[in-house]
Structure formats: C-alpha cells, structure tokens
Image (cartoon, grey):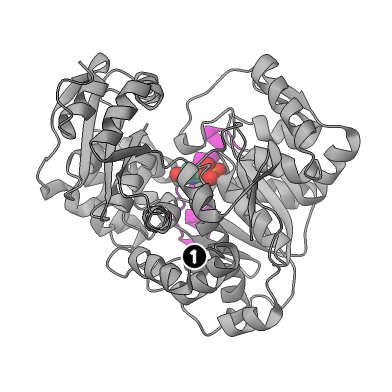
C-alpha cells in the first residue's frame, strides 16, 4: 500500500514517510492510493477479538511497510487498561432500540483525541527507527485546550520523543490549565504564554519556520515535528473504532451482519467523520454520514449548497472543539469527490486561499450529498438537548455530543430513516461539567461552586463516577508554573534543550 499527496498524485510514498512528514511539501495531505477492502471472514473473526486485536488487524491493512510485530508493539503500548477506563476501550452503549452511542472518551484526557494521540507517538517513533533517523523527535504544540493535553498524555515517556506544549495563559478553563500544569512525565514541557491562542500559535509557527534554529536543533540531536490532525498517523487510528463499533453492534444483535446503519459525528476539523467515510470505503455498511456542526455551520451550508465559504463571522460556543471555519481534513474528502483529480483540487484550494471560498459543480455536489447530510445546533438547542436526553433516558451528553444528537433528531424529522444510528460521543460530560449542569438544572445550581464541586454534583445527578484523571487533579502537584512572554517562546525551547545562546 502506498500513499499519495492530494495535490500531486505522482508523489508516492510509504506510510512511515507519510507519518514522519505529516504534510506533503506541495501543501497536500497524504491519502492511501486505494482503500483496502475488509473481507467478511476477517470481520466475522473480529467478533471474538478485543479492541487491541481488532486494531492490529486493521492497521496491518494500511501500514504495510510496518511489520506485524511493530504494529503489535505500537497498539499494545497505546490502548492499555492503565490508560483507558473501559474494558472495551471504545464501548458502544445503546440509548434506544435504534440509537447507539459510541463512547470515545474513556482515555486519559476524557475526550476522543486520545484514541488517535495515544497511538500516534508510537507509530511516529517506529517510523523514525525504520528510516534510521536517530535524532529525538521534539513535538511542538500550541493549544487552546484539549489537543495539548491529549498530546502530552500520548507522548509522555515515549522513548526518543519530547513534547513542548504552549497554552495561552488567559485562554483556557481552570480545569484545562490544571490538567496541563500538573502534567507528569520525564519528557514533557508545558509553558504558559502571556497572550491568547493566536499568540501561542504564531510563536510555534515562527519556530517551525526558523531555519537556523532547526539547524541548531538538528546538530544537537533533535528534530522538530508536529502532531496535528492532518497527519495520517492520527487519522488511521480513527478508522479502527468505526469498524470495531460495527462489529460490536452485530455482536450485540443491534445489527445483522451487512445491515446498513447511519452515523452521526460532531464535527470540527473533519477528521473524525472522514474516518467513518474511509471505513465505508472499506466495505463497512455505513449508509448516511450525518455531519453535525455548532453555530459555526460552514459545513452545513457546504453540504446543502456545494459552496464552501469562510467569509463569515466566527462564534465562540459551548462546544469549543468544533469552533472551526477551515476544516483541513475536508481536503481529503474533496479529493475523492473530484475522483482524485489533483489538478482540479489544487485549483479549489487556490480559490480557498485567495478568496476564502470554492464551489463544487452540480454533479460533484450531488455525489457529496449521496453520502453526507449536514445539520447544526446553536447553544440554546445544545443545552436543551442535554436536558431532554437526561430526563428521557438518564444519560448525560457532553455539549459536543449533544450537538450531534440534536442534528440526528432534525435528520429524523426532515429526511427520516429506518436505519439504526450510531452517534459518536466525543467527550465525557465531566470535561464540560459547567455547561452540562447549566443544561440539566439551570444556572442557579452552579452559582459560587468551583469546578471540583461541580464534578461531584454531576456525579450524584447522573449516578456515574467522576473519571479519575479529573478527580485526581485536585491533589496533584503543580509542575509547570513558569510563564513566558510571547516573544520568548523560541528562547524557552532553546533553554529546555540546552542549545546555548540560540533563540535569544
Ligand atoms: C476535536 C473534537 C471534535 C471535532 O473532531 P474533528 O475530527 O476535528 O472533526 C469534536 N468533539 C470534541 C470533544 C473534540 O475534542
């Protein structure tokens, strides 16, 4: 299996190279040159396998340049019972006769990014070893909250890697800040930047593009890299849980083998829902892919009109991980919709860069609509959905998943479906405890409460346990207290890696 760039399909390479490079030098994203079809016998065999065994089989179809031993080692290091609170890693629970929920938040940071970021560091380190690259990897991340913590947990104590996370000291919630400042691990560095998220992100970009700095890093035995969501090594782990969920639904009798089902995905950067589309390409009987957005509903408009237009206002919402205007992974779907015409794709991306918009032809739009349907929920609707689902079923949704559930109800009303539906749940409700409690009980209940008291309130309302990683925060030692001016970010990295006077 080889990979190619969406912007130059003649640029072919193996998965290890794609994972090391992250993004192609032409600005394109790496995609498999064709999708492996997963045969019925393998699927049936998987019924009796656990998540890890399923993962090993599925990854072997994509990472053909890795040995099975290498894949096994990566999977065994990533999805451990120490790190995941659920025996099943990614369990499917049934809400009603025809709605199931795929819970992707049993990992160490209580959100779905763990599913990919627990595996990526191992895939990356193994790729470097395979290529004979001896330098240590230094991952730089600017974070507005969730990704940074998930990356810290993923890279923590992985040999031959280091991770440096910059977060805006004024731009994360108290719990998010605690999650980062108490981070354990011998290769982790967390730096508060005095400024906002854009300041942190601009600083990280400046370090990546400073050639002299990269050269000095290299001569000291380090190599800068990133862990962002366009890396193939973050996408491939996400395909696994769709296949695993299908098997689990067959095993539970929710579906008969080969029976079609719909999936609903709360969407931001389009990585998660794209993985579902890839699972469908492999032969998993997914019928409709329902793309759920918050008030930043650029994807809803795109799916209904065929016009992608980011010339619009950006809103901050209570589902912050979906507050995105340019969904980078959409490029990979476009590539398929354009029947892998890289020249036409470059043209659309050029339009996006120059004018902030592009437009599909009628036949392309039609093709898109065959597979996808889009809807959205504003904050009030999201809160209402949390309350409604809690009262009807005693199940508590986080705000991102609640967006998905609201959009599912819209889909059932407007289009209708007789299929079973799998709703992808992307975060634990405890992670967004304040808004969840506002949804269920209103503002009064949380007045003057700190976040740890809120965790306990949610626990007694829902009859579920506060996840350990959040509960333990209260008593953890602060390890990363130092704050930096945004002008000094490069100097901070130089200091960490003892690069002498560089970066002054
Ligand atoms: C990142 C994230 C999303 C969006 O996922 P994409 O793959 O970017 O579409 C949704 N919900 C939560 C909780 C997230 O952290």
Asked if residue 278 is positioned above or below residue 301 in the image, the reply reads below
Tell me if residue 485 is in the magenta stretch. no
Judge from the rendering whether residue 2 lies leftward or rightward of residue 106; answer left or right. right
What span is colored magenta in the figure? 377-398
Q: Nearer the viewer, residue 142 or 495?
A: 495
Across and down, in percent, residue 451 comes to 24, 41
Asked if residue 56 is positioned above or below residue 46 in the image, the reply reads above
Judge from the rendering whether residue 238 lies leftward or rightward of residue 436; answer left or right. right
Q: Residue furthest right?
A: 363
Q: Which residue is mark 1?
A: 66
- At 28% across and 39% down in the image, what residue appears? 222
| Residue 387 visible in this rendered orientation of the protein | no
Judge from the rendering whether residue 330 lies leftward or rightward of residue 135; answer left or right. right
Q: Nearer the viewer, residue 457 or 137?
A: 137
Q: Quadrant of residue 352?
A: top right
In terms of secondary structure, where does tag 1 sit? loop
Across and down, in percent, residue 151 comes to 34, 46
Judge from the rendering whether residue 137 lies leftward or rightward of residue 305; answer left or right. left
Tell me if residue 392 is in the magenta stretch. yes
| Residue 204 visible in this rendered orientation of the protein | yes
> Quarter holding the N terminus?
bottom right
Across and down, in percent, residue 442 comes to 39, 38
The kind of secondary structure the magenta stretch mainly shows is helix
- At 32% across and 28% down in the image, what residue appears? 215
């Amino acid at each position: 299996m080889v990979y190619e760039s969406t912007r130059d399909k003649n640029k072919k390479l193996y998965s290890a190279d794609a994972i090391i490079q992250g993004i192609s030098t032409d600005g394109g994203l790496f995609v498999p040159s064709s999708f492996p079809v997963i045969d019925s016998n393998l699927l049936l065999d998987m019924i009796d396998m656990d998540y890890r065994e399923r993962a090993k089989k599925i990854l072997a179809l994509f990472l053909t340049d890795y040995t099975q031993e290498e894949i096994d080692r990566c999977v065994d290091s990533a999805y451990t019972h120490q790190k995941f609170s659920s025996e099943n890693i990614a369990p499917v629970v049934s809400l009603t006769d025809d709605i199931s929920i795929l819970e992707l938040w049993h990992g160490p940071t209580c959100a779905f990014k763990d599913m990919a970021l627990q595996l990526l560091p191992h895939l990356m380190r193994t790729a470097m070893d395979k290529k004979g690259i001896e330098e240590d990897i230094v991952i730089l991340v600017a974070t507005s909250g969730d990704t940074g913590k998930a990356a810290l947990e993923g890279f923590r104590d992985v040999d031959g890697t280091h991770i440096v996370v910059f977060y805006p000291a004024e731009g994360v919630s108290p719990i998010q800040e605690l999650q980062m400042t108490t981070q354990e691990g011998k290769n982790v560095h967390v730096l508060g930047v005095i400024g906002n998220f854009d300041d942190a992100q601009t600083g990280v970009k400046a370090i990546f593009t400073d050639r002299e700095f990269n050269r000095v890093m290299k001569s000291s035995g380090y190599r800068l890299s990133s862990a962002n969501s366009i890396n193939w090594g973050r996408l491939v782990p996400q395909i696994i849980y769709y296949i695993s969920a299908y098997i689990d639904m067959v095993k539970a009798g929710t579906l008969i083998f080969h029976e079609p089902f719909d999936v609903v995905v709360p969407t931001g950067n389009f990585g998660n829902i794209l993985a579902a589309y890839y699972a469908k390409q492999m032969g998993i009987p997914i019928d409709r892919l329902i793309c759920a957005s918050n008030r930043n509903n650029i994807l809803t408009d795109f799916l209904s009109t065929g016009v992608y237009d980011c010339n619009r206002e950006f809103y901050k919402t209570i589902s912050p991980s979906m507050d995105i205007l340019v969904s980078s992974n959409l490029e990979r779907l476009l590539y398929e919709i354009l029947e892998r015409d890289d020249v036409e794709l470059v043209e659309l991306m050029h339009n996006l860069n120059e004018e902030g918009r592009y437009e599909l032809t009628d036949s392309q739009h039609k093709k898109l609509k065959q597979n996808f349907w889009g809807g959205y929920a504003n904050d009030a609707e999201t809160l209402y959905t949390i309350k409604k689902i809690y009262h009807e079923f005693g199940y508590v949704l986080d705000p991102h998943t609640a967006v998905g559930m609201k959009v599912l109800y819209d889909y059932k009303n407007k289009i209708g479906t007789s299929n079973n539906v799998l709703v992808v749940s992307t975060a634990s409700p405890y992670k967004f405890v304040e808004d969840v409690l506002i949804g269920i009980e209103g503002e009064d209940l949380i007045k003057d409460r700190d976040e740890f008291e809120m965790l306990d309130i949610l626990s007694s309302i829902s009859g579920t346990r506060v996840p350990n990683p959040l509960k333990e925060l209260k008593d953890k030692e602060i390890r990363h207290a130092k704050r930096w001016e945004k002008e000094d970010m490069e100097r901070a990295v130089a200091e960490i890696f003892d690069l002498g006077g560089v970066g002054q």
